[in-house]
Amino acid sequence: MPSADHNTAAVRLLTPADATLYREIRLEALEAHPGAYSSVFVRERDMALSWFEERLAASDVFGAFIEQELCGVAGFRRQDGTKTVHKAMLWGMYVRPAARSFGVGRRLVDAVVAHAAQRVEQLQLSVVSDNEPALRLYTRAGFIEYGRDPKALKQDGRYFDEILMKLFLDGSTG
């Protein structure tokens, strides 16, 4: 990872042309942190590149770049139900270890929040309860905990609780 600071990390929406880079970082995230995501490495590893291209075409996935290297990702997905269209999810957040001290995670969260603020009233996320750095990041960005999902994920016989968090984009607290 090149040396940089958070001011040099460029964040932009990924496009299908970024599928190779996205596939690489997504598989890295799933393999390095199997308990943190609802998907699993062995499933996505076997997906064709076209699957990742389609995902990027159908989703709003932000990428953080330092000197042209993709070092972090975060997704935005709006809910589509008639009564829930005012809400969206921040999903698939991952920052490569070498970029974590440069504020890349905060830049990605800020980009998703700014994107969401133009589209929805609430932004939600779930994070594994033992992921203290992510919990600190989301709390500093203004997210509040509104629930806990015990044994939300199960990987290799181990359960993981998820903390449910939300940010009201109008500045209210609920």
Image (spheres, rainbow, N blue to C red):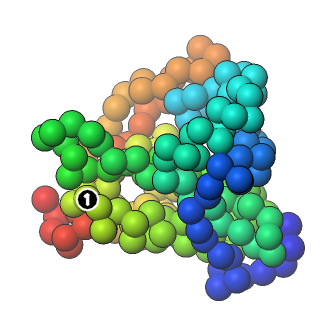
Furthest toward the bottom, the residue is 7
Rendered residue at 62%/55% (across/down): 15
Q: Secondary structure at mark 1?
A: loop
Give neighbour class at mark 1: few <14, some 14-19, many 20+ (Cα, 10 Å): some
Work out whether residue 54 or residue 2 is closer to the camera in this orientation and state it. Answer: 54
Q: Is residue 16 visible?
A: yes
Query: Vertical placement of 3 versus 126: above or below?
Result: below
**In the figure, is residue 61 to the left or right of 53?**
left
Quadrant showing the N terminus: bottom right
Quadrant of the rendered image containing residue 29: top right
Rendered residue at 44%/52% (across/down): 76
Residue 111: give x, y in percent of width and height: 48, 69
Work out whether residue 75 or residue 94 is closer to the camera in this orientation and state it. Answer: 75
Tag 1 residue: 120
Furthest toward the top, the residue is 157
**In the figure, is residue 59 to the left or right of 103?**
left
Quadrant of the rendered image containing residue 7: bottom right
Rendered residue at 67%/22% (across/down): 43
Residue 40: give x, y in percent of width and height: 64, 26
Quadrant of the rendered image containing residue 48: top right
Residue 18: give x, y in percent of width and height: 71, 53
